Amino acid sequence: MTIPEADTETGLDEMLKAIANPVRLHVLQQLKDPEKHFPGQAHPYELGVCAGKIDDACGLSQSTVSAHLAVLQHAGLITARRVGQYVFYKRNEPAIAAFLEHLEQRL
């Protein structure tokens, strides 16, 4: 799977589509301050936020949250890291910064 680059039309479109959904935008916002929005995680936040914590915070089914996370990951806005049986997600800050810069230049 290739990650779209923010400085291409396709990459910009993918990122805009990813954050157009209120659930995905909310997850991306919450991941900015994981200690506040996902308290009580047993693993270090440096790994990211455990998918189960994101499921709990969203109040949606695991499969629905997984689909939303996949869209954010495909757009390059978050990264996933598997550690044993757990998958941790965190914001891709360089990609988000490039997206915002490119968006500012385009508008």
Image (cartoon, grey):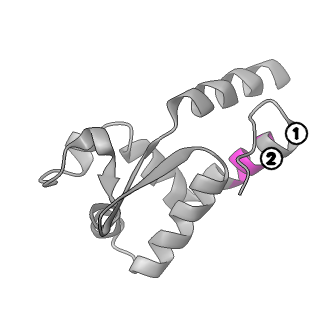
Residue 27 x %, y %: 44, 53
- In this image, 77 relative to 52: left or right? right
**Where does the N terminus fall, quadrant-wise?**
bottom right
Q: Viewer-proximal residue, 62 or 57?
A: 62
Residue of label 1: 9
- At 43% from the left and 43% from the top, the residue drawn is 29
- At 31% from the left and 44% from the top, the residue drawn is 47
- In this image, 48 relative to 22: left or right? left
- At 80% from the left and 29% from the top, the residue drawn is 7
Q: Viewer-proximal residue, 64 or 51?
A: 51
Residue 79 x %, y %: 50, 47
Tell me the magenta residue range: 12-17
* Residue 52 is inside the magenta segment: no
Residue 87 x %, y %: 37, 61
Label 1: element kind: helix
Marker disc for residue 13: 2
